Each structure stands twice: as C-alpha cells, then as structure tokens.
C-alpha cells in the first residue's frame, strides 16, 4: 500500500467544515469543499508520490495496467479504475438526477458522438462517456436525501394539501398509482416557463403543515421558479443515521440534501438532471431513462461479514465497499478482498499492509494498493473504509477465515 492524495472539488453546495475537520485542517475552509475524490477519474485524479513528485493515479494505471488492475479487471473494464470513492459533504441540496444503465450509456454516448461529439462539461450533452453510474452512499453524519419514488397515493395527498388548483392534473395522475408516475413527472417538468415562479410561489405560501410542506418551502426558497420543487415531493425523504446507506441504481431519481457520507460509484460522469438546478434539464431523455416504479425501502442495512467488518451488498461488479473497525486490544483484521484497493481512514489511526508495503493512516488519509497483492491486513485503533472492484460484497462467511 502507499499513500493516496485525493482531490477536493469546490462545488457551491459543499461544506466549509466537514472535509477540513476530517483531515484536521483549519475550519472554516477558504471556500466550499463538496467532495474529496479518491480514484483515477480523469477530471480530478488522485496522486501518489514518486521520487518527491506527485504522479496521477490515472497515468500509473495506463502505464502499468497489469500491475495495478490485473488481467481480469483489464479484460472487464480496460485500463481504468472502474470505481471512484468520495467523501461527500453537502451543506445545500444537490440537483435531482438519475443515471443511465450500461446499455443506455453505451447507446447514448455513441449517438451523441456520431451527431456532434461530446466531452465532459459540454452543456448540450447528456452522455460524456459510455459507462453507467450506479452509486452507494454510506452516512458518516446524519444525512438527508431524496431517493426513489414513494407510493404515488402519498405524494398525491401531499400535493393536494397545498390547495393549488393548477396541480389538480398532477394529483389525478398520481391517484392512478404507479402507472401515473410518468405523466405526473412529465407534467411538472414541462410546466410553462412563464408560470413556474407562480406555481412554486403558490406552494411556498400555502397554508400546509408537515414534513412535505417544510421540505417544499425549504427547496422553494432556494429554487423559486423550479418545478423540481414539486418533483421532489414524489420521492422518499430519507434521513440516514451514521452507518446506514442508500443505493442509487440506474433510473433512480434522487438528490442529496444535507450531510456527510462516503460515496462509491462506477466511474462515470453521465448525469440526467430533473430540477433543483440552473443547469440543463433534458426532459425527454430523463423520462426515457427513469424507472417509474415504487421503491419500497431505499435504505441499505450493513451486513456483518467478519468480526469488525461490514459491507453493503450491491448488485454490480464495478465496486464493493467494506467498513473495518479495529481496536488496539483486539486482533488485526485480515481481508481477502481482491485488488486494486483504496482504503480511507475515517477516524483513529489504522495501519494497512497488503504485502507490498505498510502505511499508517489518520483521519481523512487514504492509501491505494495494486491487484495481485496479498491479503489486506488492518490493525490499530480506528475505522476505515475499503473499496474494491465488485463481487467481494457478495462473499459469504466461508471467504473470511475468522467465521469459517
């Protein structure tokens, strides 16, 4: 293992304390710090030290793919790290968004490239790479999020409670059950531009009470002419406690509202927005990608797999995430997880050793190790997250000698 130096993204919704506090830097930070990226994404690759100079992990993967990724991962994903680990710290809501599945991403990217050519950051492009972007977020603090469609009848009652006559067609569509979700979202996102501010203002000023009304007023204050304020009320409002997670598969409409968490995702930039943003919303493409189905429970509960080790199982092979808790008086933890590996220390001090080298990490520090390394050994006193390629999260007790 060797130290991995992450890159901080300064999006406006970011916290000026969470990541700085985690890393032991002065608070408040000079500007918003929204995400700490620990991976090989070309926009903000993490770096490692080579002879006193920082070298991009992306460049190392390209130069030594067999060493860093291994034959199997190169055959599956090419010369790129298929996952990206982040510490995400939100002080304000992110946009409503969804991501395509793998087939939609490949087809959408090919079509846009054939038509105009697209690159990351181009305003008129939906697909800037040919990859899907499922995501898992584990809360480090209490964390508020919107995730997946809830029972449409509950949403209909919430919207009807504002007493805004213009919303009657939307309420009627929702009363039809899941079959009406598409029409309800379509109607809201295609609301006439000239009438949007009036609609949101009417909802904000309505004599309504309860959590939905409070959320609507909070979002309306930030986005006074955005119909996404109403779309948000069709989703589960989830309040995670530390250690709980939410899973965002393809087609799942979601938004993070506030809090700090560790996020792991497939390494892609394909985002289709649905509101709560000044950025472009491609309504037709979003409607094509969304899965209009009720999500019974968006919360993923941690599953113990060994003493001091839990994971959050997800049905993809791009990534897996484990959390390891070690104590000085307890035994070291041995993780038979495949490389490449990225380890992030959350708190305390942990020593990680994969046979290629040992590194001691403090809060907010990270390490990376290559494919083909030995069993990962974690010791010390603290908590660390271990990210790997997928498949590991479906392992049973027989894969961990402690529980065999």
Image (cartoon, rainbow, N blue to C red):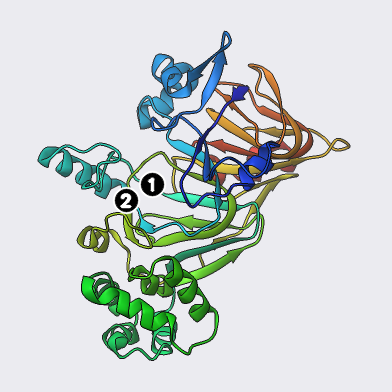
Quarter of image, res 379:
top right
| Residue 398 visible in this rendered orientation of the protein | no
N-terminal of the pair, mark 1 or mark 2, is 2
Look at the picture and state if 356 lies above or below 299: above
In the rendered image, the quadrant that contains the C terminus is: top right
Which residue corresponds to the image point at 25% horizontal and 48% vertical from the top-left? 126
Check disc 1 and report its element: helix, strand or loop: loop
Check disc 1 and report the residue beneath it: 133
Question: Label 1: how many residues lie within 10 Å, few (<14), some (14-19) or many (20+)?
Answer: many
* Foreground: disc 1 or disc 2: 1
In the image, 150: left or right of 285? Answer: right
Q: Is residue 315 above or below residue 114?
A: below
Residue shown at the point (41%, 85%) measured from the top left? 153
Residue pointed to by mark 2: 101
Residue positioned 50% across, 28% down in the render = 46
Q: Which residue ends up furthest to the left in the rendered image?
A: 115
Instruction: Residue 290: give x, y in percent of width and height.
Output: 31, 62
Specify whether residue 81 is in view: yes
Q: Nearer the viewer, residue 111 or 194?
A: 194
């Amino acid at each position: 293992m060797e130290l991995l130096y992450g890159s901080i993204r300064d999006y406006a919704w970011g916290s000026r304390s969470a990541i700085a506090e985690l890393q032991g830097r002065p608070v408040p930070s000079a500007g918003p710090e929204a995400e700490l990226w620990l991976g090989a994404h070309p926009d903000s690759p993490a770096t490692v030290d080579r002879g006193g100079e920082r070298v991009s992990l992306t460049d190392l993967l390209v130069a030594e793919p067999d060493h860093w990724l291994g034959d199997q991962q190169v055959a599956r994903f090419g010369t790129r790290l298929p996952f990206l680990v982040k510490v995400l710290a939100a002080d304000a809501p992110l946009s409503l968004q969804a991501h395509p599945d793998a087939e939609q991403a490949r087809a959408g990217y090919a079509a846009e490239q054939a038509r105009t050519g697209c690159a990351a950051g181009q305003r008129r492009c939906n697909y800037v790479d040919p990859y899907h972007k499922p995501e898992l977020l584990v809360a480090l603090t209490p964390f508020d999020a919107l995730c997946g469609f809830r029972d449409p009848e509950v949403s209909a009652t919430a919207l009807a409670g504002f007493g805004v006559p213009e919303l009657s067609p939307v309420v009627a569509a929702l009363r039809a059950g899941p079959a009406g979700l598409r029409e309800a979202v379509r109607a809201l996102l295609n609301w006439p531009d000239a009438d949007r501010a009036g609609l949101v203002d009417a909802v904000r000023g309505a004599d309504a009470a309860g959590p939905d009304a409070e959320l609507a007023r909070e979002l309306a204050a930030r986005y006074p002419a955005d119909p996404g304020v109403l779309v948000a009320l069709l989703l589960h409002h989830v309040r995670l406690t530390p250690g709980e997670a939410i899973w965002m598969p393809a087609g799942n409409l979601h938004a993070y509202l506030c809090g700090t968490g560790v996020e792991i995702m497939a390494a892609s930039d394909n985002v289709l927005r649905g509101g709560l943003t000044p950025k472009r919303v491609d309504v037709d493409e979003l409607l094509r990608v969304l899965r209009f189905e009720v999500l019974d429970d968006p919360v993923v509960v941690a599953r113990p797999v060994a003493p001091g080790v839990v994971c959050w199982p997800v049905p993809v092979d791009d990534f897996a995430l484990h959390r390891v808790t070690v104590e000085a008086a307890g035994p070291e933890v041995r993780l038979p997880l495949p490389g490449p590996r990225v380890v992030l220390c959350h708190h305390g001090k942990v020593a990680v050793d994969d046979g290629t080298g040992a590194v001691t990490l403090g809060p907010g520090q990270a390490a990376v190790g290559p494919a083909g390394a030995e069993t990962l050994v974690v010791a010390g006193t603290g908590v660390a997250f271990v990210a790997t390629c997928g498949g590991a999260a479906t392992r049973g007790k027989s894969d961990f000698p402690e529980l065999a």
